[in-house]
Amino acid sequence: MIFEYNIGDEVIMKKEHACKTNLWIITRVGADIKIKCKNCGREIMMDRLKFHKKLKKVIDNGKEKEN
Ligand SMILES: [Zn+2]
């Protein structure tokens, strides 16, 4: 599966964070991806492969509203 995402996009991860949300914001895109928990503000970094495995859905703010 191919994901398209940019800094500032919201993403839903397969597993929820310790604070019981699974909604994150992408804050860095590179060899490693950094995401910030929307609820508690905790930031975590992981490599692209791991990120893709854990990623459930990218919420493209523009597209999501059109549907
Ligand atoms: Zn959290």
Image (tube, grey):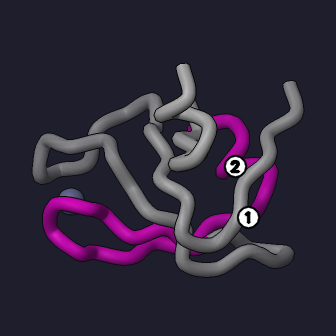
Q: Quadrant of residue 46?
A: bottom right
Q: Residue at x 20, y 43 (%)?
A: 21
Does dot 2 land on a helix, a strand or a loop? helix
Q: Residue at x 26, y 62 (%)?
A: 38
Q: Residue at x 85, y 75 (%)?
A: 31
Q: Residue at x 73, y 74 (%)?
A: 29
Q: Tell me, yes or no, whether the highlighted magenta stretch contains residue 30.
A: no
Contact, mark 1 vs mark 2 (Cβ under 8 Å): yes
The stretch in magenta equals 34-56
Residue 15 point in image, percent of width and height? 37, 33
- Decide: is 5 above or below 25: above
Question: Mark 2 highlights which residue?
Answer: 50
Q: Amino acid at mark 2?
A: Lys
Does dot 1 land on a helix, a strand or a loop? strand
Question: Mark 1 highlights which residue?
Answer: 47
- Left-right relation of 54 to 42: right
